[in-house]
Amino acid sequence: MQRITHTIYKIGLIAAVAAFGLFGIGGKFVSHSQSKAVSDSFIAADIVNENFESGSKTAYAAGTVTLTSGVWFFDDALTGTSVMLPADKKNSANSARMRNAGTIQMNFDVANAGTVSVQHAVYGTDAVSNWKLEQSTNAGTTWTQIGATITNSNATAFQTETFTINSNIAVRFRIVKTSGGTARLNFDDFIVTDFGTATPTPTITPTATPTPTGSPAPNVHLTLGNPSNAATDVNQPNNYLLIKPQFDTSHNCAKGTPNWVSWHLKSADIGSTTRQDNFRGDTTLSAIANCYQAQDNDYTGSGFTRGHHTPSGDRTSTAANNSATFLMTNMMPQSADNNNGPWEKLESYSRSLLGQYELYIVAGGVGTGGTGTNGSATSIANGRINVPAQTWKVIVIMPIGNNDVSRVNSTTCTIAVVMPNIQGINANGWEQYTTTIDAVESLTGYDFFSNVNANTQNIIESRTKITDCNQATTTTAAGVKISGKTVNAKNRGIARANVTITDTTTNETRSTLTNINGGFEFAELISGRFYIVTVKAKRFTFDENQRGLQAFEDNDDLVFKANR
């Protein structure tokens, strides 16, 4: 990948020059003298053209901001008319300003990126700063640098850097300030040109390049399979794949809701970030003609809640991750008693398993017609958003590890539920709605966990309860033991802490007090069952006060640590 440095002149010409290098001479940069031979009619289309004129982020603290092109993540960076100062370089009213080791990052993917160009300048008379451009092809999980690190010493005008990408897979970009320190930089007019749509007519005969096609590369959330073979293809607007760092979803434009949302849940996803509550439309749907983008106020007065598929509580590691769960492409109209009752209880139970397990979850709504606080309805938002008749969820629960597809076997535990989208079920537990994954497949028409061996699928998808997961164990049916200890921040035992254990099959609860060393033990437990262990102690708050685990064998290593 190459970098091209210019002084400022028309961005369209920059895009054309870079794109012609892509098409005309094998990806090599066409020099300024060579570019004169290119027809002026050759202008590459822009798939991102961000000028920072809309949206506002008025503090340097890490957070997201919705701009014209989509949702961006800013860390030690800000933008907006109210924070622009005379020393800010900007082409119009606004630009972005960055300090320290700041980051400006796309929180969405684009396909067929030809070039990236961005204008940059020193803020005011600040010292020289360095920055780099990075790309991610796995929805922001890992990043690689593109080209060389850029040094900016220009205090009077913008410079433009153009990077050749030439990629037909899903990719996102970020700018990272590498020099640290308080010296600030301004950025403006961040443009990504389309690798596949330009049709050049230069005097130099180019080698023909076919238009790339295909969907973004899947990330971890679809490790076990794509239930409906969704694709990022505008020609299938009712099975349109949206890939995000926090979840993947098949969106249905005709219904205004997801067909399904799929996500991977691990302990690292849980942190201390507070609920962002920034419900908003998902601008990535603008790629699809006539696809309605649901808005927050579509649910106002409807009698239905904005029901999360991927819960806010499953994404508390960062503000950006939590914020993503409030995109309306993660919502469905859900009765309050469904959402706040058995649905939420299953969400909480799932998180309780994270001490030893990781989960693959797929959820959605099915049918038409539910009952909210205003009575029954088949749709909201003047018919643009379907109200499902039922909500469903399927879960695969695995011990923490690697190579997850190959680790799914006949003893792997699963949960499947189908719940009515009605009022009056708030007090109900999720357990009474359990069914088989096979039954959910018949109801929805989807094929869950299709990457798993077919014989294994037949076994795990026919189970009706999580207690069926006690197959193929060598431990006796009774006599399994769970023990551990409670400690303070200095790892000293906490005596007389209250510890309870709940059998999720029978809801039977047993309690004990820790001994002088903080130890506790529960014996004669049933092999293969799931248990939830909860601790409480006067004057102590625990970093994690609840753990869920399956008692296949004796477990003596549970440690609950207080924060003082």
Image (tube, grey):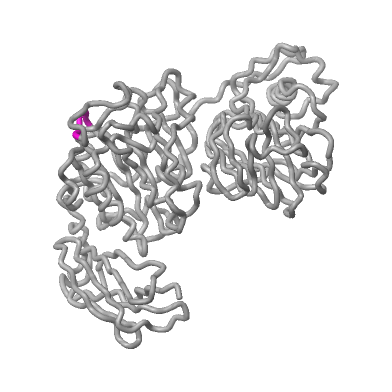
Magenta stretch: helix, strand or loop mostly: loop
Vertical arrangement, residue 263 with respect to residue 26, above or below: below
What range of the chain is rendered magenta?
367-371
Say which of 500 and 36 sits in front.
500
Which of the 4 image quarters holds residue 236? top left
Vertical arrangement, residue 422 with respect to residue 409, above or below: above
Q: How many marks?
A: 0
* Picture coordinates of residue 534, whole percent (x, y): 29, 69
What residue is at 37 percent from the left and 24 percent from the top?
A: 253
Say which of 236 and 469 sits in front.
236
Q: Is residue 429 magenta?
A: no
For the C terminus, which image quadrant? bottom left
Which of the 4 image quarters holds residue 238? top left
Q: Is residue 370 magenta?
A: yes
Give the farthest residue toward the bottom.
516
* Picture coordinates of residue 276, whole percent (x, y): 45, 47
Judge whether residue 25 can be spotted in this image. Answer: no
Horizontal arrangement in the rendering, residue 416 relative to residue 277 (left or right): left
What residue is at 47 percent from the left and 40 percent from the top?
A: 244
Vertical arrangement, residue 355 with respect to residue 208, above or below: below
Which of the 4 image quarters holds residue 56? top right
For the N terminus, which image quadrant? top right
